[in-house]
Image (cartoon, rainbow, N blue to C red):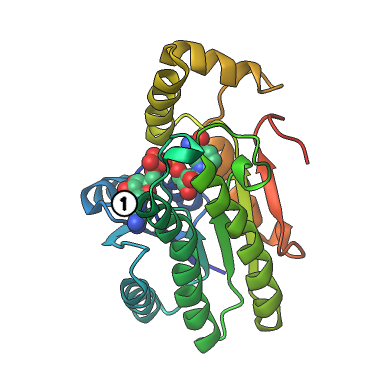
Amino acid sequence: MANPTAVVTGAGSGIGAAIARELARRGHYVVATDVNLDAAVAVAASIGGRALSLDVTDPVACEAVAGEVANEHGSIDVWISNAGISKMQGFLEVSPADLVRTFEVNTYGVFYAGQSAAREMIARGTRGCIVNTASMAAKQGRVPFLSDYVASKFAVLGLTQAMAYELAPHGIRVNSVSPGFVATPMQERELEWEAALRGTDAAAVRSMWINDTPLGRLETPEDVAKVVAFLVSEDAAFITGESISVNGGAFMD
Ligand SMILES: NC(=O)c1ccc[n+]([C@@H]2O[C@H](COP(=O)([O-])OP(=O)(O)OC[C@H]3O[C@@H](n4cnc5c(N)ncnc54)[C@H](O)[C@@H]3O)[C@@H](O)[C@H]2O)c1
C-alpha cells in the first residue's frame, strides 16, 4: 500500500518521536499526537507529517482524532498507543490519586485509543495494525519504586492479547513492544528519582542499569522504533497478540 497512514500517541518525545520518525522513513504518512501539542508539532514538522493534540485519557478525544484522521486520509492503517507516564516512589507511598492517574494514562489510554482505532479500521474494512508500548516492567514485578507502573503495564499485555483475539476476525493485528532502560526524558526523570530514593546520584543509577543490561549500554528510542516498524510491516503478517522484548537482555522471558 502506498503511504499507509500511521497515528502515534505520545509522539512528542522519546520513544514516540522515534517511532514517528522511523515510520515516516519507511513511507508512512504519520500523524503525531500528544497531550503536548507543541512537541507533536515539532516532530511532525521534521518528518512532513501532521500533528494533533490528543490526551489519551479522554475517550471522546480519542474518537475525535481517529475519526478526523480516517476522514481526511481515507483510513487508519497503523495506530501506535505509546503515551505513558511514570513516577517513582515506594509501594507504601503510592496515593490513590497517583494510582488512578497511572492507570488512566498507561492502561485506560491504551484501551480508549485502541477502541477508537479499531472502530475506524473495522468501519472502513482496513486490515490494520495496532502496537501498544508496554515495558520490561510489564513482564516482571522485580522493579523498584514503580508498583503502580508495573501493574498498569502488566494490564497492557493482557489487553493486547484480548484485543488481538477479538480483532483477528477483522484482519487487524495487535502487538506490543516491551522496552528496557531507554534513554528518553522519562528516563532522565527516573534517574533522579531513583538516585534520591537510593541515596546516591544519577550517574551511579545509570551505571547500575547498564550493568543490568547484558548488551552493555542504555537502549535508544530507535532500538524500539525499528521493532515497532517491523511489527506493522508485512514481515510480521502472522504475528498477533505478542509482546516483543527489546531490552538488550536486561530481562529474558
Ligand atoms: N524510557 C524508558 O525506559 C521506557 C521503558 C519501557 C517503556 N517505556 C514506555 O514507553 C512509552 C514512551 O516513554 P518515553 O520514555 O518516550 O517517555 P517520555 O516522557 O519521553 O514521552 C512520553 C510522551 O507521552 C506524552 N503523554 C503523557 N501523558 C499523555 C497523555 N495523557 N496523552 C497523550 N500523551 C501523553 C508526553 O507529553 C510525552 O511527549 C511510555 O508508554 C513508557 O511507559 C519507556
Q: Quadrant of the N terminus?
A: bottom right
Identity of the residue furthest to the bottom in this view: 123
Q: Residue at x 71, y 21 (%)?
A: 214
List the residue tagged with mark 1.
44
Identity of the residue furthest to the left in this view: 38
Q: Where residue 95 sits: x, y (%)?
A: 38, 48
Task: Please state which of residues 85 and 131 is positioned toward the viewer in this rendering.
Answer: 85
Above or below, 92 relative to 241: above
Task: Please state which of residues 179 and 142 is positioned toward the viewer in this rendering.
Answer: 142
Instruction: Work out whether residue 12 can be spotted.
Output: no
Callout 1: SS: helix
Q: Residue at x 56, y 24 (%)?
A: 218
Q: Where residue 90 sits: x, y (%)?
A: 47, 34
Task: Please state which of residues 83 and 208 is positioned toward the viewer in this rendering.
Answer: 208
Q: Where residue 225 sits: x, y (%)?
A: 54, 44
Q: Quadrant of the C terminus?
A: top right
Amino acid carrying label 1: it is: Ala
Above or below, 57 relative to 45: below
Task: Please state which of residues 202 and 34 is positioned toward the viewer in this rendering.
Answer: 202
Q: Is residue 80 left or right of residue 62?
A: right
Is disc 1's CB within 8 Å of ligand 1?
A: no
Q: Residue at x 66, y 62 (%)?
A: 158
Instruction: Work out whether residue 173 can be spotted.
Output: yes
Q: Residues within 10 Å of mark 1 (few under 14, many from 20)?
A: many
Above or below, 207 relative to 159: above
In the rendered image, which quarter is residue 29 located in?
bottom left
Q: Is residue 34 left or right of residue 161?
A: left
Q: Where residue 50 sits: x, y (%)?
A: 30, 59
Ligand 1 located in image quadrant:
top left
Numbered label tally:
1
Q: Residue at x 63, y 40 (%)?
A: 136
